[in-house]
Amino acid sequence: TLVPGSPEALREKRKFEELTKAMGSFVSPEEHKEFWELVAALIHLGEVQFMEIGGGASGGGGDCTPVRQRGSISMSPLEGSPTSQATTEAGGGDAKVQVHPDSLDSLAQAAFLLGIQQGGLEQALIYKEMNVKGRSTIFCPRTHQQAVQTQQSIIKILYKRLFDKIVERINETSAGKSDMCAGQESRYSSIGTLDIYGFERLGTNSFEQLCINLANERLQQFFIEEVLEAEQRVYEEEGLRIQRFPLPNNQPVVVGIQSVMGILDEHSLRSSRGLVREGAEADMKFCEHVHRNLIEGRRESPIMSLRMNAKAAREGTAMKANEGFQVRHYAGDVTYQTKGWIDKNNDALVPEVESLLDDSNRALVRGMADRNRMQAASTKDSVSHKYLGNLNELLATLKQCSVHYIRCFNPNDNKEAGTFFNHYVLEQVIQCGTVELVKIMHHGFPNRCFLKDLRERFASLLPPDFERYKDGEFMEAVMLAFEIDQCEWTLGNRRLFLKAGQLLVLESLLEQGGGVPQDLLRRIRLHFAKRKLRSIVAKAKVLRMWLRSNRKNRVRTLVTHLSKAIFIYVRSMRWLVKTRSRISPP
């Protein structure tokens, strides 16, 4: 607790004033007040505690209570009662939990700040509403664990939607959408910085680490495709014979993780529809499905079963086979524990909560209701589905940008300053593709410029009579004229390729503007003349060979045609003789 007037309290006050001032740049004072009210509502909702009643300690979902109906109006177990005291009075005596009496004030404050009915919020926490097609709506009492999970889900998802709305407002303000037409937006350029996740391999790795490491895999594959493979493709397109190097392939790992997320979405959808038991048993079923589809019978799969840890087995802390799996990442093998994954993958509020939000008298809260989710849930509501979509959008954006990389390496895994572990850093250098990049740059030419652009810049360095040469010949003359080592450069079809540091040499030549000795210019002219003569002689040889070959082909063709003519003539004469003998016998 902060003491009023203390240095820490004053510091927190200044930070809050800075935050308020910053938020004032993209939200109005009325919206500002609603933002803080929503945050306060989530805090109050988090203070709500539950207590078990009746058979609330059981792990199952319990029996479901059919809704009593008055004409066309459905009556819920808590209808007409603002407090949990009404559970037994309104026909909800089968409830397994109720709001703790000490938490009723927090529940009332949360409902007030959200602009919704307290009884409706309480009912959504205690009962699960199920609409059966062709039958009346029924209410299934939640267990204590399920009530807490529902409470945490509401807090998590509303906070996430508030965060998304703030980010959206910041982006709109930064892009200046309020001051320009939609057609003018495309004229704006931007510079962005992508600080990628660090690869995570913790003592216990869960769903969050899988998402983070998937992003690392995708970004690493993007680096390999857009930098290393693109570098080798450029050499092929330019007709250069540069040694090719085998490159790592992250695609099998990416496909494997996406398959795991697909299976997780299936089980999350079944859980949200109440088709399976909730809790650890559902997570185990999901893990068994992963083993069955992606591990069993596959030798080279990047998704692997758990390795046995003898020490953990002796201590009784080892994970069971249906509690996790391993993934062979580019940075090493990582063990993932699947406990709680189905709950973490749920990113949808129950339909009854969405309806409560949609009926709120607060504009901000009402705007956060997703009307599309008021019906049955779908796999599109999952965290993994959204995460994969956002990751694809990020990579599509990166492909449209001119990307520059800054490689950062962690000097040690102890988070200590001034400590450098050689083997630890070397592993990072090898894993992230830096070795392949250095090899390609060492054997290749990291600097390249278009010949046409270079000729326009360096045209003043050579006499006017060199203007008759083509772009490639002109730049070759420049490199020869200033005696730049021929091992440091090469010519492609459209570009001049340079070793590291040679581009700076060319720039210094341009700044100095020094003349070229006449005897060296004569040798360059003689060099091009000899090359042209050799080209003419080679073409003449090819032409003469073609003529000889053509003459032979013509003779061969004439002989073939003559043979056919003689054959036809002989056959015709024999036929003629036979015909005459038949017409006029001797």
Image (cartoon, rainbow, N blue to C red):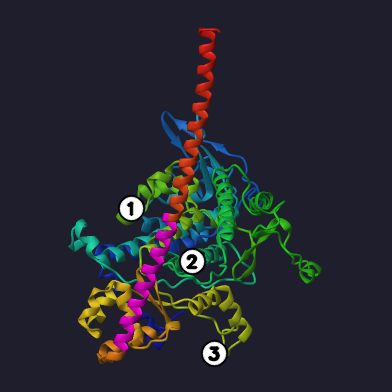
Q: Nearer the viewer, mark 1 or mark 3?
A: 3
Q: CA distance from mark 3 to mark 2?
A: 36 Å
Asked if residue 11 lies left or right of residue 288, the reply is left
Q: Please give the name of the residue rendered at 35% of the width and 69% of the height, measured from the top-left corner.
A: 494
Identify the mark nearer the N-term, 1 or 3: 1
| Neighbourhood count class around disc 3 (C-alpha, 10 Å): few under 14, some 14–19, many 20 upward | few
Any mark on residue 475, and which? none
Whether 225 is among the magenta residues is no
Instruction: Measuring from the top left, give residue 526's x and y in whole percent.
Output: 33, 81
Identify the mark nearer the N-term, 2 or 1: 2
Residue corresponding to mark 3: 417
Q: CA distance from mark 1 to mark 3?
A: 48 Å
The secondary structure that most of the magenta stretch takes on is helix
Q: Residue furthest front?
A: 586
Q: Secondary structure at mark 1?
A: helix
| Neighbourhood count class around disc 1 (C-alpha, 10 Å): few under 14, some 14–19, many 20 upward | some
Q: Which residues are magenta?
A: 520-547
